[in-house]
Image: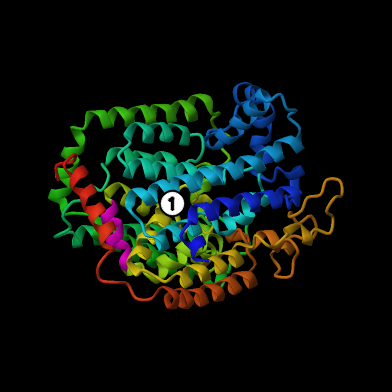
Amino acid sequence: MMNIYRNPTLFFTAFILLFSIWYTVFPDIIPYNGGFGFEGAFFYEAVAKNCYEAVVVQGINAYSIQRILPFVVAHYVLRGLQLPLTDAVILQYFMLYNALVAVAVIYYWHRLSQFLGLGLAAVWVGYLGLLISCATLKYDLYVPFTYDRTALLVGLMSLYYHLAGHTIRLLLVALASLAVWPTALFCNLLLLLLPPYSQIPTAGNRSISRLWALSSGFGFVALCVYVVYIKRIHDATIAPTATAWLPLSIGIAGAYLVITQYAIARALLGNSAQLRQMGKALWVRRGTWLAVGLLVSCYLLLTKVLGTQGNEHLNGKTFLVNIVYGAINRPAQFLISHASYYGLPVVLALVYWCQVGGIIRQLGLAVGGVFVLLLLLSVNSETRQLPNLLPVLVLVTALLVQQLAPPPRAIAYSLLIGLVLSKGWLYINWFDSTLGQLNDKFPINVGTPGAEYAWNSPYQAYWMNIGPWTSNQFLLIQGIVLLFLLVVVRHLYGTPLLKQNSTTAARTEQKHLLFRSRLSL
């Protein structure tokens, strides 16, 4: 067993490939729209089958075009191999494609962990966070015609190239990411603008940190009040809102933003004079601004020229409504949903939150800015919106574990817990009584409206994994499981050590000295 523990990269490569082969031989694929699911059938199936016609002639709306890359690649790869562009071939291609993407994720986490000098426990936790979850072991296999895993990969690549100081490679990944995930633009702008490991003194930042935290929390509360009570906008597409609990739900979400934003601001920000000095230092970095200009120009070409206008799948108004109800539909549902979908890294961050700020500071302002974006967006319980940001959370929790130095036994139990939580063992189509019939619409409820949100509904086999659509009973069960996991993880991983692992500390400090001079802070 110790040989397995000493070779995590080999273990996870073999595991992912074998798991993917199993699901290829014994598939469990969503029946709705012939296996293409929801957004896949509505926007991207046509791209995979006839890219030029769908993108250039017919046009893709300005939002959906920001996720188009995997399907464009699929079209031209299959054409290059002279394979028929049938439903079965395309779905088989994406099963293989997602497996190869997972192997690429393993490769880049291996590179990043080696670069930072992480110990075995931290390396294992990284792999567990990236791969052993409902996202990777269930959703991507049940809905293979998707972009989620590609977004995870490009997010990890951007993080690695930033920390390793490979600016050109980071820019290339950033350009490709424009057609993979909508929030990639903002993440990569931060990673390009700010040098790796850049820091500013935090003395005297209490006032500005409070201002930022209170603005974030109360700004969100004001948005909720405007949407729910003033405009009276309702989102009827998700599980019924617990109206009586709305004030509590809004309060929890607002408090979450105030607490998390204050902690990270205290770790990252300086006083107003130091922030002005940082702005001046950034302004003279002409090469960086050229890269930023190129990235923004390509984004505008993609969304304003190639993308069609006025028919966005998700415009600004819809986005804000989704954020509001994804956060406050039921009290604290966003925390429960994230822990259920991504597993270990969410639980570790909750248990050891007091140590997170210090780790974020080590990684620098750019990674800290991406982490701030992750926290802001995480009030939405639809966890699928966060795959490109997950690598930052995983890296933070891996560095936490580097300090905790848990025994191999803790990692073994974490693997078992992750496998159970992932539901990779659960065949969702077991619950489809119409499986194999023509025009099978499972997991969409075609009967009594709202029946899919009952705890004993067969449709919950799928929807219980997708935050806002989880039934109240399953949300409660997942909340109890989360509370149990907080206790178990605290017991397994123990108390944080006062000092960081000496090897990682030395390497991190060396990188600080190397890169800090670029910003003259």
Residue 90 belongs to the span the image colors magenta: no
Q: Is residue 299 above or below residue 421?
A: above
Direction from residue 308 to residue 145 in the image, left or right: right
Q: Looking at the magenta stretch, what is its main secondary structure? A: helix
Q: Residue at x 55, y 60 (%)?
A: 341
Q: Position of residue 176 (x, y in %)?
A: 47, 33
Q: In the image as oriented, which residue stretches furthest toward the front?
A: 3
Direction from residue 139 to residue 227 in the image, left or right: left
Q: Residue at x 63, y 26 (%)?
A: 76
Q: Position of residue 303 (x, y in %)?
A: 49, 30
Q: In the rendered image, which quarter is residue 261 located in?
A: bottom left
Q: Residue at x 25, y 52 (%)?
A: 507
Direction from residue 80 to residue 115 in the image, left or right: left
Q: Is residue 97 above or below residue 251?
A: above
- Tell me where the magenta segment starts and ends, as one range: 355-363
Identify the secondary structure beneath mark 1: helix
Q: Position of residue 229 (x, y in %)?
A: 49, 61
Residue 356 belongs to the span the image colors magenta: yes
Look at mark 1 in the image and give the residue it sits on: 391
Direction from residue 474 to residue 108 in the image, left or right: left
Q: Residue at x 78, y 62 (%)?
A: 431
Q: Nearer the viewer, residue 410 or 327?
A: 410
- Quarter of the image that includes the C terminus: top left
